[in-house]
Image: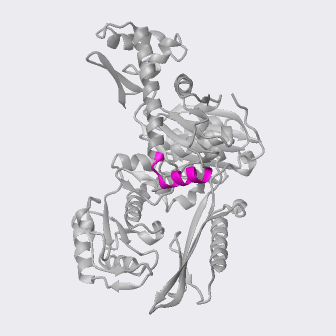
């Protein structure tokens, strides 16, 4: 049996699968002040009357890290940067308590400017005076040579042993300085709170005598063991949208082009499955105003959900972007789109009189009946969703990878269908699809599709190897792994080394079952020249186990509606 649990902003959903089919589901309101209790409540419902030994795997999708960063609840963190020549970071808006110090490493890993020990000690005093205990250190080309990052940590720990360090070369190994800065800084901010959360979940499982592997869904739609996530909390950002995409994928598994529309209480998240493959954000996950090096699906969030507040403004109405609680029909304080649907469907969702009373307060000043207002609300919601899909495509059409797709396939993208996810999907998706001239699917399990997506997503791992024969070194983008290579080293040698490290890491991370499902996505080589002579080669090889569903679901057709 497999367990999948998705902790959303409004509800926590769970599913229990047996032989590839959902045999039980659960849904409870999320307690944002205590996510662990929400998880355990759903888990207890799922495992009731179930043999614990039959549970083979559990996967969580959680908003914890996303919420910590969005609300500024992460730990106060200092950021030490070693940029070297080039980009002037002093003119950019980075993060509070940022310190730029001397030192430089070039793109081949050669130290071209030493660090200044006295300057680092002065920086340490300022960090101590600010009462900061978390420190992120990022050098521009530290994945090629981590010596200066490690030296900064060594110098500061002599005088300030209480400091906790997160180093860029270990956290974000793919070159792009600004994205590596953001990833390392956010990791340092959230690491301690994420580790406490993870340990509490493990204790809860232990107390229930559940001894199965526990995984976390990542932003790229794949999973990783909870133990691995302890050092990579930011990989879990946007796992909610990733869960909805993977849930939609699991429910369809076709080669069509579909818009995934996940309508929650506060937002509607839109994503694209392009000819059976989810579309990725070309610049990595964006957290606040900063792009990161975290691989993530391309998702557009619209501040519109089933619980968005309806207000009368002059002779018109507004919907959202805020949410004051559940819909009035469920005892909430304000009228919402859910109440409009409830009126039009004659109390199918909840208390009909409660919806009528809430909408009447808005309808009377506008000179409208409650029925007229309800129809107007639904029309506006559908219009906003339709226009958001159009804008999403306008944005994607400007993406280089999107243009390549159109060139290769000699045609532009046409939407085949809209897949509705979430409690409000049945109420809004059909009308949006009809207005756009495409089909739609709202599955019987759409309300818990995020939990299904978490349950059936397989492990993923992406590895990039950089090898420089002139320097005699190689570097991986994961865990700061580096080493020496011989002068005679070919592209085939680089591909073999990348494959062997991928398989080794998959085994180390308890993902051995999927080691043979790899694919190369990058193979590049360049000559290095000195004095008009070739003196070496540089190789870059990318290899991955891409997102997909677990083997147990591969040959099982989920019932469709």
Quadrant location of the C terminus? top right
Along the horizontal axis of the image, is 114 left or right of 173? Answer: left
Q: Residue furthest front?
A: 410
Q: Is residue 410 visible?
A: yes
Q: Residue at x 62, y 73 (%)?
A: 498
**Marker count (numbered):** 0
* Picture coordinates of residue 256, whole percent (x, y): 65, 40
Q: Is residue 219 visible?
A: no
Q: Residue at x 54, y 27 (%)?
A: 429
Task: Give the vertical position of 544 relative to 393 (above or below).
Answer: below
* Picture coordinates of residue 408, whole percent (x, y): 60, 54
Q: How is the image coloured?
A: one colour
Residue 402 belongs to the span the image colors magenta: yes
Q: Which residues are magenta?
A: 396-409
Along the horizontal axis of the image, is 547 left or right of 398? Answer: right
Q: Residue at x 59, y 34 (%)?
A: 419
* Picture coordinates of residue 83, whole percent (x, y): 32, 73
Q: Residue at x 61, y 32 (%)?
A: 446
Along the horizontal axis of the image, is 38 left or right of 559? Answer: left
Closer to the camera in the image, 320 or 12: 320
In terms of secondary structure, what is the magenta stretch mainly?
A: helix
Residue 131 belongs to the span the image colors magenta: no
Task: Give the vertical position of 199 relative to 388 (above or below).
Answer: below
* Picture coordinates of residue 307, whole percent (x, y): 43, 26
Closer to the camera in the image, 214 or 341: 341
Quadrant location of the N terminus? top right
């Amino acid at each position: 049996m497999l367990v999948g649990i998705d902790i959303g902003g409004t509800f926590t959903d769970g599913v229990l699968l047996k032989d590839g089919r959902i045999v039980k589901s659960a849904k409870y309101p999320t307690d944002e002040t205590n996510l662990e209790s929400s998880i355990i409540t759903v888990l207890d419902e799922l495992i009731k009357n179930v043999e614990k030994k039959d549970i083979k795997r559990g996967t969580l999708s959680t908003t914890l890290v996303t919420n910590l960063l969005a609300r500024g609840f992460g730990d106060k963190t200092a950021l030490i940067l070693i940029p070297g020549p080039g980009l002037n970071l002093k003119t950019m808006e980075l993060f509070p308590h940022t310190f730029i110090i001397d030192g430089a490493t070039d793109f081949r890993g050669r130290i071209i400017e030493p660090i200044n020990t006295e300057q680092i000690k002065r920086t340490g005093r300022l960090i101590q005076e600010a009462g900061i205990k978390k420190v992120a250190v990022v050098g521009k080309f530290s994945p090629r040579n981590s010596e200066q990052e490690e030296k900064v940590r060594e110098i500061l720990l002599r005088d300030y042993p209480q400091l906790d360090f997160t180093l860029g070369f270990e956290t974000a190994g793919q070159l792009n300085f600004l994205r590596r800065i953001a990833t390392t800084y956010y990791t340092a901010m959230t690491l301690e709170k994420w580790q406490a959360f993870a340990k509490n979940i493990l204790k809860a499982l232990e107390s229930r005598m559940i001894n199965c592997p526990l995984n976390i869904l990542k932003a790229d739609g794949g999973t990783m063991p909870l133990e691995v996530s302890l050092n990579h909390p930011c990989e879990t950002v946007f796992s909610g949208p990733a869960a909805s995409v993977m849930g939609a994928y699991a429910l369809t598994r076709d080669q069509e082009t579909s818009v995934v529309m996940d309508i929650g209480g506060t937002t509607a998240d839109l994503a694209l499955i392009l000819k059976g493959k989810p579309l990725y954000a070309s610049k990595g996950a964006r957290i606040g105003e900063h792009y990161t090096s975290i691989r993530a699906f391309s998702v557009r969030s619209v501040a519109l959900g089933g619980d968005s507040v309806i207000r009368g403004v002059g002779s018109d109405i507004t919907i959202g972007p805020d949410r004051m609680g559940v819909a009035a029909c469920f005892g909430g304080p304000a009228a919402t789109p859910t109440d409009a649907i409830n009126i039009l469907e004659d109390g199918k969702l909840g208390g009909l009189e409660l919806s009528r009373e809430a909408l009447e307060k808005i309808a009377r000043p506008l000179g409208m009946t409650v029925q007229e207002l309800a129809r107007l609300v639904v029309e506006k919601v559908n219009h906003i969703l339709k226009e958001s899909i159009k804008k999403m495509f306008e944005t994607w059409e400007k993406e280089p990878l999107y243009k390549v797709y159109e060139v290769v396939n000699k045609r532009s993208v046409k939407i085949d269908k809209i897949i509705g996810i979430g409690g409000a999907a049945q109420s809004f998706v059909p009308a949006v699809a009809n207005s756009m001239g495409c089909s739609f699917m709202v599955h019987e399990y759409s309300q818990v599709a995020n939990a299904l997506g978490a349950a059936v997503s397989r492990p993923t791992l992406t590895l990039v190897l950089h090898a420089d024969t002139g320097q005699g070194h190689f570097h991986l983008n994961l865990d700061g792994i580096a080493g020496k290579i011989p002068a005679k080293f070919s592209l085939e040698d680089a591909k073999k080394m990348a494959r062997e490290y991928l398989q080794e890491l998959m085994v180390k991370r308890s993902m051995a079952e999927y080691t043979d499902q790899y694919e190369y996505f990058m193979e590049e080589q360049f000559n290095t020249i000195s004095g008009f002579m070739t003196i070496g080669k540089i190789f870059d090889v990318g290899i991955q186990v891409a997102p997909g569903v677990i083997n147990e679901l591969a040959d099982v057709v989920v019932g469709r509606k």
